[in-house]
Amino acid sequence: MKSQSNSQQNNIVPANATFHNQKNKLLLPAWLVIGFFLVVPVLMMLVYSFLTKEFRGGVIWEFSLAAYDQFFFDRGLFGDEPAKIDWTYIKIYGRSALQALIATLLCLVIGFPTAYYIATRPVRSRPLWVFLITIPYWVNLLIRTVSMKFLIRDNGPLNTWLLQAGIIDQPIHLINTNLAVQLGLFYSYLPFMVLPIYASIERFDFSLSEAAADLYASRWTTLRQIILPMVKPGIIAGCILVFVPSLGAFLAPDLLGGAKNFMIGSLIEEQFKGNAGNWPFGAASSMILLIIVLLVLLIYARNESHAQGAR
Amino acid sequence: MKNRFTSTIVKASLATAFALTSTVANAEGSLSIYHWFEYIPQEVLDKFSEEHDVEVTMDTYDSNESMLATLKAGKLGSYDVAVPGDYMVEIMRNGGLLDSFEPAELSNFDNIMEQWVDVGFDPGRKHSIPYQWGSTSFSVNRDMYEGDINTTGILFEPPEELAGKINMLDSQGEVLALASMHLGIEQCNSNRDELKALNALLQEAKPKWASFNSDGAKDVLVSGDAAAGMIWNGFSAKARNEGANIEYVYPKEGLVVWMDNVVLLKDAPNRDNALKFMDFLLEPENIAAITNFAQYTAGVKGVNELLDADLIASPETNPPADAPAGSFVAVCDEETQKLYDQIWTNLKK
């Protein structure tokens, strides 16, 4: 795709009048930033995950697999029982993945129609709608999450209104539940879903769906066979942008979930700043999370390239 | 969108990198405090700032352990003073995180009450001065529960009515100490059966707790989110003053007492100002303002006359005659502490 569009453009504009020959140099700043601020910390994390835990926080520079061992095996309170597989941390990861998945689906179900609506507004009014979507981002995520906590508490405004309206006769107990965490994640990341899908639908040529209608396709068929395949990249981008941060979120579990059940993010945070800090274990947990995310993205990328190869 | 996402990550990494590498400028006239949340009124800081022409900055933490973790993670050398509890002073002293001073360096050193000079966690006060002391137990909302509350069973084996409505402090030392008192076992225990019992007690209690929250421990009681909550005595007094119908309990099994202390940190960038600040806090007038704000008890002579009448009479600072004596959180050796760390990890996972 890329090389095609480049060559097309090169035909029109003399190459030396553009930046096209300088492609690599254009990327240099990005590479430097990513190289320094992403690769270096990840490597540090990798190294730390294989070190020995120091008493009361910190590490001793001795190679150890203890962090990974702790993740997968349970040796009892005193560490001398025969090792058996420890499901606790695996369950935490499973729970977080499920939460993130549900949040992603919720965002998709609400975000797609929203994006579709915005993309079908007159060109002039679209920026206004996009602007409205980004308004919540003027307020810090922490503050938004705390406000949500106030809204949904047992005797908070939400319950008061529902009770007064006669919709419920018992307050809905939301605070410190998984549902509250889900709600928090969904609310935090909804724009991450709407905006990429909007960008895709906006580029969609609606004469195609009109053509489908002319050929007697039902609206449902048009959506499924024409629109969805065309805007799929936007949907997938949105899903990744919601799923990945949800997976590692710690504000919502901490504030809305009562910090009682660990999610991946809070588990890792606790290792570095919590009471029984364990840096190597925190680093190992982060590495495992990183590997899972990379695997998911790799599988997606492979499927994509297979699909394109088939075409 | 993607750009925005990455730029957030970049910003976060930048911030971290700065935090790790930058040392606060040694400019004349600044003081950097690492303090508990909601523990000092702004007016007191402003007053110090004006009197000594010092620019004061403050970061806050919500547990002794997280303060230690942050200092160990590379922040030592960027703060001048911190305010650890008794057992944490000992841990920090043993870990070489504290600088020392001579009594002569503080003109108000003699204002410290006699019983708080030669303390176990800092004999002769070479690294610290008293800040406030108090107790850790729990409070119960009397609108929501009317039964007998004079037992730690309220937290660890809660009655049906309170199940699911209890907030715990996110504070390893205090939770485990109180749970040990409930079982009537020693702190820093290495008896396997007793530790197993402690572990089991906490595992069974956990489903009946709503949350672990220290900085919100007051708010959950005021808002009614929690019907009972583990809390520090002064923080409970504040909750009561904000309208919660709660009673602070002196359980018959015992309660935790603590003393927070201002310590001089190792590699303090502004050692002189740190000592000025400590001297300032030993003035009865200044420390009394903090006591009136935080509702605990000071360790300085001549404070009592300066306290609010409400505070002098408050049930949170006046235990009943039959209240048990409190115990400090004990500092265990490494082998034993590892077992307690394991129990805490089991509880939180």
Image (cartoon, coloured by chain):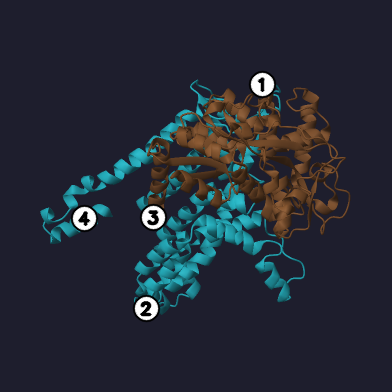
Chain colours: A cyan, B brown
Q: Is residue A277 left or right of residue B210?
A: left
Q: Quadrant of residue B223?
A: bottom right
Residue A270 appears in the figure? no
Mark carried by residue B335: 1
Kindly identify which numbered label has been placed on residue A6. 4
Q: In what quadrant of the picture does the C terminus of chain B appear?
A: top right
- Looking at the image, which is closer to me, A102 or A311? A102
Badge nearest the viewer, 2 or 3: 3
Q: Amino acid at mark 2?
A: Pro
Q: Is B105 placed left or right of A212 in the picture?
A: right
Element type where label 2 sits in the image: loop
- Tally of numbered discs: 4
**Cα distance between the residues tagged 2 and 3:** 26 Å
The Cα–Cα distance between marks 1 and 3, rounded to whole angstroms, is 47 Å
Look at the image and tell me in which quarter the N terminus of chain B lies.
Answer: bottom left
Callout 4 secondary element: helix
Instruction: Classify 10 Å Cα crowding around label 4: few (below 14), some (14-19), many (20 and above).
Output: few
Nearer to us of marks 4 and 3 is 3
At 25% from the left edge and 44% from the top edge, which residue is drawn?
A: A28
- Amino acid on which disc 4 is placed: Asn
Instruction: Please state the chain letter of the residue tagged with numbered disc 1 in the rendered image.
Output: B
Q: Earlier in the sequence, mark 4 or mark 2?
A: 4
Q: Is residue A303 visible?
A: yes
Q: Are marks 1 and 4 on the same chain?
A: no
Q: Nearer the viewer, mark 4 or mark 2?
A: 2
The nearer-to-camera label among 1 and 3 is 1
